[in-house]
Image: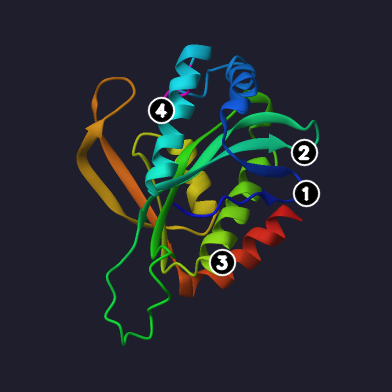
Amino acid sequence: MLDPVTLEGRHVRLEPLSLDHIPGLVEAASQSRDTYGFTYVPVDADAMRLYVETALAGRDAGSMMPFATIDRRTDRVAGSTRFHHLEFWDWPAESPHQRGKHLPDVVFIGTTWLAAGAQRTGINPEAKLLMLTHAFETWLVHRVRITTDSRNEQSRRAILRLGMRLDGVVRTDRVALDGVIRDSATYSMLDSEWPEAKAQLTARLR
């Protein structure tokens, strides 16, 4: 289990997800749901509690780090995101890449959703900047990955704007939210690519 961390910028604050966030998450999810066609967002308090409890169980197992996304303009919950599928590689003791077993080597960023009023603002790109910075500069990961339904063109464009690169499309990958078997577009960024991506994303936020 990794130490909890709060990540804060000008537009957004990412707080360690807790049961206390459930009412705010329910309120955020009650706005227009027109953009949730490819993203699971709980519809009521009971579903949201299960969603949060599942995320916290993953946190306790050491496989994820979930956040509540807070809009700093209003100090209200705007959604949720998380690191997940943390990978800890088995390095030889003499390897120069060995950084200690407590630091992940690869992480995914995902399970991200925002209230309708928080979309198309600086919240999502800044949240990704904060998470990428933490992954590459605090954990010193070698790769960050993001995956999305291949049909989700809006998400795919947003991922590319972060500086991620398309690794490929995994065919017949999993059951999608609408019940079909989806293909997944998978993207990644390497530690060697991070400085350039960071500079471009920082300039974009300015």
| Comes first in the chain, label 2 or label 4 | 4
Query: Could you tell me the amino acid type at mark 3?
Result: Thr
Q: Are marks 1 and 2 in contact (CB under 8 Å)?
A: yes
Q: Are marks 3 and 4 in contact (CB under 8 Å)?
A: no
Q: Is residue 188 left or right of residue 19?
A: left
Say if 136 sits above or below 79 in the image: below
| Furthest residue toward right | 73
Badge 3: how crowded within 10 Å, few (<14), some, or many (20+)?
few
Q: How far apart, in angstroms, are the residues tagged by discs 2 and 3?
A: 23 Å
Quick check: can you spot residue 44? no
Query: Could you tell me the amino acid type at mark 1?
Result: Arg
Q: Who is closer to the viewer here, 85 or 170?
A: 85
Say if 113 sits above or below 134 in the image: above
Q: Are marks 2 and 4 in contact (CB under 8 Å)?
A: no
Badge 4: how crowded within 10 Å, few (<14), some, or many (20+)?
some
Q: How far apart, in angstroms, are the residues tagged by discs 4 and 1?
A: 28 Å
Write the start and end of the magenta stretch as one range: 37-42
Query: Could you tell me the amino acid type at mark 4?
Result: Phe
Judging by the rendered image, the residue that carries numbered circle 2 is 72
Quarter assignment of residue 114:
top right
Tell me residue 144's x, y (percent).
Answer: 43, 59
Assign the magenta stretch its main secondary structure.
Answer: loop
- Frontmost of labels 4 and 1 is 1
